[in-house]
Image: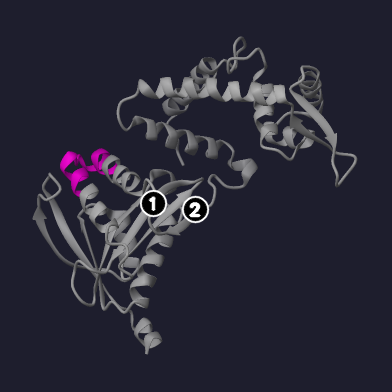
Amino acid sequence: MNTDPSLVEDLRSASRAMVREFGFMGGDFAGTELSPSAVHALIEIEHGGVTARDLGTRLRLEKSSVSRMLRKLVGSGDVEEQASTHDGRLKMLSLTTGGRKRVAEIHAFARVQVTEALSRLKPGQARRVLEGLRLYTRALGADLAGTASSAVQVVQGYQPGLIARITEMHALYYAREWGLGQRFESVVASSLADFCNRLENTRSRIWTAQQDGEIVGSVALDGEDMGPGKAHLRWFILNDSVRGGGAGKKLLAEALAFADQNGFAETHLWTFSGLHAARHLYEANGFALAEEWPGTQWGKEVLEQRFMRPRPAHALQHAS
């Protein structure tokens, strides 16, 4: 991939500025007199089951650097060492009472720092910051991790925050790419809320793609709103961070398998012209364009489209 040199320099400049703002250059770091590596070490030790070797791997520090840092933390009364019950040659690290208090103060300081920074952003920008940092961090660590992202899991059913998160993904993407605004967001939110109130119907389902505990994609199969024998594929969307990684295929596979297993003769979806990647995925899964017309239901005139997928012959044979 050809990367714009000016983008590279802008990212380097932003990274240096962030390092300075966090205090990595010296002075007060995380509200303590500790070095950045010591603060990160305390947080890792808090999680439990950590050895000096583990710290070296996670923090990318040499053995001698870890040893010096641990001597200081043990000497200050924040950390204690104990021989492993499985291997006497290994020393397990844990926080003392004082160490736990210090880590609690570090977390409190950091939460205030992040909260204050996010409060200065415009609505919708906080999520973009999170997504950007995750993407960039994963890309930086791809050589060590062997992959630029953690696995995406497909989860069935409603979960707290689902309506807000799916609406947010739709609103931000379609505002940015297509200039759709409040009317579009309101339609998504109200129709999704109504659908979730009907999820007790066994012929309707919703699935979310999740990564690191966050919803990064969704799709639903509505078995009620189109009449007997017809299913409605709805709210299919992916977050920028997982586009092109196979999450969309997983979501569609779940929804269409459910449609076939429940005997729907047809599955329909509504979209509009210009969403080329989505259309390619739909057609690869047996959908074909049935009709299109100019419409303004989303608050802006677009060429609306309806795609239809008949139940595959192999599904009919399996059912019989």
Quarter of the image for the C terminus: give it: bottom left
Q: Amino acid at mark 1?
A: Gly
Instruction: State the residue in front, 297 or 278.
Output: 297
Outermost bottom residue: 320
Rounded to the nearest angstrom, the CA distance separating label 2 from label 1 is 9 Å
Does the magenta run of residues contain 113? no
Segment tinted magenta in the rendering: 173-187
Q: Amino acid at mark 2?
A: Val
Mark 1, Cα crowd under 10 Å, few <14 / some 14-19 / many 20+, is many
**Above or below — where is 25 with respect to 313?**
above
The percent position of residue 60, horizontal first and vertical second, equals 70, 31
Q: Give the labeled residue for mark 2.
A: 152
Mark 2, Cα crowd under 10 Å, few <14 / some 14-19 / many 20+, is many
- Which residue is at a point 24% across and 47% down the rendered structure image? 189
Q: Which mark is residue 217?
A: 1
What secondary structure is the stretch in magenta mostly built from?
Answer: helix
Marks 2 & 1, CB-CB < 8 Å contact: yes
**Above or below — where is 92 with respect to 160?**
above
**Above or below — where is 105 with respect to 84?**
above
- Where residue 123 sits, quadrant-wise, is top left
Taking the image as shown, residue 212 lies to the left or right of residue 270, namely: right
The percent position of residue 41, horizontal first and vertical second, equals 69, 28
- Which residue is at a point 65% across and 27% down the rendered structure image? 40
- Where residue 95 sits, quadrant-wise, is top right
Q: Secondary structure at mark 2?
A: loop
Taking the image as shown, residue 262 lies to the left or right of residue 132, namely: left
Outermost right residue: 88
Q: How many marks?
A: 2
